[in-house]
Amino acid sequence: MAVRDSKKNWDGHLDLITLESDFDFSLTYADKKAANDILNTSRIETRLLWENSSTSPNKFYYGDNLPLLTHLLDDPTVCGKVRLIYIDPPFSTNGVFKSRSQNDAYQDLLRGAEFIEFLRQRIIVMRELLASDGSLYLHLDANMVFPIKLILDEIFGRKQFRSFITRRKCNPKNYTRNTYGNVSDYILFYTKSDNYVWNRPLEAWTEEKLAKEYQYIDKETGRRYKKVPVHAPGKRNGASGQTWRGKLPPFGKHWQYTPQTLDEMDARGEIYWSPTGNPRRKIYADQSAGIPIQDIWLDVRDAHNQNIKITGYPTEKPPQLLKRIIEASSNVGDIVLDCFSGSGTTIMGAEVLDRCWIGMDNSIEAVSTLLTRLKHGLSPMGDYIEKQNHPLKQLRLFDSIDSIPQFSLLTSIPYQGELDDILSQWLNEK
């Protein structure tokens, strides 16, 4: 297997290597607006529709999210203080979407450069709202994820790109005949700086995986362990490249630690010596909190069987997906923002995990879905399930909550009573 070493150790010529800045590029298209013009967009006023706490930072806005986002630029409690933004915007599918109850949810009709600029303008404002240690997760499919990555590179800088996450979104599509089954979508993960909140997500060990990974048992302590090399790729001229216990590191490699540190590890019984005298390091199972999550996620599919509860809103994402992202890139009390809130999974995740939240959407169906979810939780998804007597539970995390979370509902558009019926019904429901 090929391993990467520093170019300083290259024995050949480096004449063709140029500075990284020489590779800078941008995506060009008609009507691409200057960033300053976007940030200086005329401000709007918002109108309070309902609140159950005047002190809660939680807010949901009904209206176009671009003027709403720029409105937040003038809010000192929000601008530069948002720790995490997750968005699941339209995917440029050229389609319209209805809820499970066949109500109009949203249109996804922007294509090409229009779609790119639509999303770019909002991302530019979002970057300003992020805290210096904040993160953005942007969820798309293969249709537009690659040009949008170039846009994110422009806005955040390529060095702030962290991960291109591939998510298995559904079960295999056996009816696909002329190509591979489309079972994946993608999440782009960027940070505003190199110093960002990161709580590494872990998968719990199972007995089977533990026994397979840590195959050996320490005779004296009974602790399970595995053996790993004590050397690493690359030549070094310092202490880690010198002789230890009469041995040089393998050709083209160096010791992972200085000889002094290796002596200390050996004295603690952390070095295994093979019958031929080769050292290996012992890594104990009880020192591992879990298996680090990688950038392919197979365990957070959308609702796919009748044991799962949902809202019925189209393109709804599973709670476990948002739980992983929120816990990884924010801490308790942080502000989480989702300006394409849809069914409200991000908001519910933030609420249950003790984060503050700001949501936005321009769909009345989304507002109705969110209010119902905040008060009553989720519903069984099956077509033939008797809703009143359904015995199955949602796969944890977001069952219905006992009380309505503290938040305010506001609008940015001329309010003409669009939400009157929805609010009235919601407030009177038991």
Image (cartoon, rainbow, N blue to C red):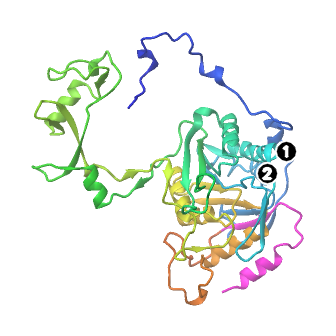
Q: Nearer the viewer, residue 383 or 330?
A: 383
Query: Against 76, is 265 above or below?
Result: above
Amino acid identity at mark 2: Leu
User: Can residue 52 be seen in the rendering of this structure?
Assistant: no
x%, y% of residue 254? 29, 23
Query: Please, what secondary structure does the residue beneath circle 1 have?
Result: loop
Query: Against 244, is 195 above or below?
Result: below
x%, y% of residue 140? 65, 51
Q: Earlier in the sequence, mark 1 or mark 2?
A: 1
x%, y% of residue 211? 25, 55
Badge 1 is on which residue? 41
Crowd around label 2: few <14 · some 14–19 · many ≥20 (10 Å): some
* Circle 1/circle 2 CB separation < 8 Å: yes
Badge count: 2
Quadrant location of residue 282?
top left
Badge 2 is on which residue? 66
Q: Nearer the viewer, residue 121 or 272?
A: 272
Quadrant location of residue 120?
top right
Relative side of 18 to 10, left or right: right
Q: Does the magenta segment cover residue 419?
A: yes
Query: Against 380, is 70 above or below?
Result: above
Magenta region, residue range: 407-430
Per the model, the C-alpha gap separating discs 1 and 2 is 9 Å
Crowd around label 1: few <14 · some 14–19 · many ≥20 (10 Å): few
Q: Nearer the viewer, residue 102 or 240?
A: 102
Give the label, 1 or 2, closer to the camera: 2
x%, y% of residue 158? 61, 33
Tell me the tag on residue 193. Answer: none
The residue at the point 26 percent across, 51 percent down is 285
Amino acid identity at mark 1: Thr
Query: Please, what secondary structure does the residue beneath circle 2 have?
Result: helix
